[in-house]
Image (cartoon, grey):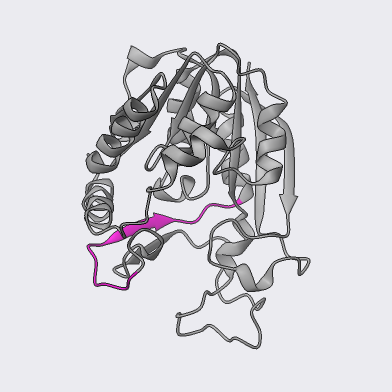
Amino acid sequence: MEKYIEGNKAAWEEAFDNRDESWGADIADRVTNEDYPFFNEDMKRVLKEIDTNGKVIGQFCCNNGRELLSLVKCGKASEGVGFDIAENQVAFANDKAKELGLPCSFEAVNIFDIDDGYKEKFDVVIITIGALCWFDDLKRFFAVISKCMKPGAVIVINEQHPCTNMLATAGEEVFDPDHKLECHYSYFEHEWKSNGGMYYITQKSYQSKTFTDYTHSMSEIITGMCSNGIVITGLQEFDYDISGGFPEINHNRYPLSMIIEGKKC
């Protein structure tokens, strides 16, 4: 396992071990009672247009499993498989699947190490916010995704827009609250390291193990997909934040999030 992935595994497992008691507590209730919970309205609309009835769905970087559980239940899929690096999050997700009685399973694995046991397994693949940044090489990442997709399978990516990589967030030294849209970083910056924890899970600041992530341009994402036999069938860009990092600049004519759709040849 690459050193940076091994480090991220330890950092994510540390964060989940120190999670706030509210993190994940609403999954069973919301999946049972709501329509496509844990997806924003634009993503819901896209997913509802896809035939998931009786299909097999895969999610790469599934976190605590809530989105896959939501889609399998509401989309009436026959099976869902989620992959994540953190063993404790995967164990939690498997427990939720059992609690809900849904045909979902979750595997703790480095995405780069997914073997041919999942070759041409999935009819539908989803990738959601905060997944792409954990991989240094998107061509290699999408090679694994493509391998796991059946011919004709579709993929939907709902992610932070690459342009947000140029912005500073509250708490950073260069952040100026009076100029929130000022670009401080290169669009083409690549590796970032942080020991600032994972606040959205823990609801507290702490000195964490090292997280290493990577920024990717739109061209890296699109090229990574196309070079692995995935044809782009749709691209939507939105001026609202889904990352939790830029809520104060929603609807200010700056691209903050996106949905990319593709199909394997």
What is the count of numbered marks?
0
Image quadrant holding the N terminus, namely top left
Q: Quadrant of residue 63?
A: top left
Image x and y of residue 92, in percent: 28, 39
Q: Residue at x 60, y 86 (%)?
A: 177
In screen coordinates, is 194 left or right of 77?
A: left
Give 65 or 258, whichever is nearer the viewer.
65
- In this view, the residue farthest toward the right is 253
Q: Quick check: is 16 in the magenta stretch?
A: no
Majority SS type along the magenta span? loop
Q: From where the camera sits, is residue 61 visible?
A: no
Q: Is residue 5 visible?
A: yes
Picture quarter with the C terminus = top right
Answer with the quarter of the image where residue 162 lies. Answer: bottom right
Is 265 situated above or below 69?
above
Residue 47 percent location from the top left of the image = 66, 30
Q: Which residue is depicted at the point 78% across and 66% down? A: 253
In the rendered view, would you say 12 is above or below 145? below
161 left or right of 202? Answer: right
> Is 261 displayed left or right of 68 in the figure?
right
Q: Measured along the vertical axis of the image, is residue 150 above or below residue 69?
A: above
Question: Which span of residues is magenta-colored?
Answer: 204-217
Image position, residue 12 (x, y; %): 28, 52
Q: Position of residue 17 (x, y in %)?
A: 22, 54
100 or 2, nearer to the observer: 100
